[in-house]
Amino acid sequence: MTTFYAVLRHRGDVLVEQGEQGWALPTVEGEDAERAVAGLLPGDVGSQQVRIGAPIGDDQRRPVLFDLPERPTVGAERAWRCPTTLLDEDAAPGAWDPYERVAPTVRSIAADDEHGAAYLSVRALEVLRDRATLLAAEGERDPDELHDLGRRLLRARPSMAVLRNRVNRALNEAGGADDEAAPDARPTSEAIQRAATAGIEGALDADAEAAAAAAELIEGDAVLTLSRSGTVLDALGSATLSGVFVAESRPAREGIDVAERLAAEHDAPVTVHTDAATVHVVATEDVDAVLVGADTILPDGRVINKTGTCVAALAAAREGVPVYVVTASDKVSHESTVNLESGDTGAVYDGEADLDVLNPTFDVTPGELVAGVITERGVLDDAEIETIAEEHAAAAAWQDPPSDGHQDPREAEWE
């Protein structure tokens, strides 16, 4: 029997409970973390396990992090609070430790090949928020360490414009770069903590509004999708559809999980198919629309997304099927450079033959193949995309070149 600290996360907050010594994370016992944590939740609230942390203390309690799709109502002795409140005076001694063991880090963001860019951008803001709060609690007000952390977050996923834009905005707004009265003001740790926290709420609201707009557009349709985008999943989950086709999305095959989730939520038939069959499916099945997410929208309207998106768009164009991209406007990049990540070659071939292996994670879809980029700001045209790109360029003003290019010896601690 194992005792688990249940770190249940929704919209950047975690569930805490009032104990004799103050607020703390709830604990549960069981052989399996998922089953043990299920006892804290109403039967209709699902959860997705993210990670299990290293044991804590002599009794080897293990923190386990779960994402919740919705926030269940709790009684008077429990509350949903920002995890940084576990550092407050009304928190139990050591309450922060189990959260810190499973909290997002630069390393976890860089290594994550399961979640989309919007999800990872929120995790990046949480990293910034958590570190800023710790520094503020220690009385450290100089922003240099947090600026270094911001740069490392940007380098962790260089192809993800939404992560870059949201981190840039938090650090830029905290620094008062838009304040004409004090354009050179240096941010404090407290200001960065507040900006990152506000950024998390704004990001989640934008993603939800974009998904709602897309759901209206595809109402009643049979839709083809691929890969895993939280915004696409929310849109498909909110609409009444006549059918859904999901490409398996190799090599990670995240489309399988998407198809299973949609099948559990929809009365309409859900069909999973191989990536190689996408052209055939669009040509022979009654597909009304293709709906995909985006890792990045380039200033000229091109779309960077999971490999296979361009093939689906080309197939749809041939058959006269509209392709919609649903995303928050924060995924519009101010940089025209295409920076495509590659996956592990061993996921494609791990044999002994002398072969070159290609495993591109992303491809680029021409803007002319896209019928509409659906965002919280409406369906964007080329001029609006360009304007948003200029806004995002201005938000990068906080960045100054690192002083010497060397790694701070504290980086191992931050990770």
Image (cartoon, rainbow, N blue to C red):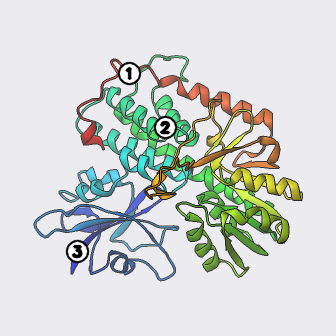
**Is there a contact, CB below 8 Å, between mark 1 and mark 2?**
no
Q: Nearer the viewer, mark 1 or mark 3?
A: 1
Residue type indicated by callout 3: Thr
Label 2: few (<14), some or many (≥20) within 10 Å? many
Helix or strand or loop: what does disc 1 sit on?
Answer: loop
Q: Earlier in the sequence, mark 1 or mark 2?
A: 2
Helix or strand or loop: what does disc 3 sit on?
Answer: strand
Where's residue 128, x and y in %?
39, 41
Helix or strand or loop: what does disc 2 sit on?
Answer: helix
Where's residue 305, x and y in %?
64, 48
Q: In the image, what residue occupies the spot 45% across and 44% down? A: 125
Report the disc number at residue 402.
1
Cα distance in 3D space between marks 2 and 3: 36 Å
Position of 332 with respect to 42 (left or right) is right
Residue holding disc 3:
3
Nearer the observer, 179 or 211: 211
Q: Is residue 114 visible?
A: no
Cα distance in 3D space between marks 1 and 2: 17 Å
**Is there a contact, CB below 8 Å, between mark 2 and mark 3?**
no
Residue holding disc 2:
167
Q: Earlier in the sequence, mark 1 or mark 3?
A: 3
Residue type indicated by callout 1: Pro
Against 253, residue 144 (above or below) is above
Nearer the observer, 198 or 5: 5
Furthest residue toward front: 353
The quadrant of the rendering that contains the N terminus is bottom left
Label 1: few (<14), some or many (≥20) within 10 Å? few
Q: In the image, what residue occupies the spot 26% across and 63% down? A: 24
Q: Earlier in the sequence, mark 2 or mark 3?
A: 3
Where's residue 156, x and y in %?
44, 40
To which quarter of the image does residue 65 belong? bottom left
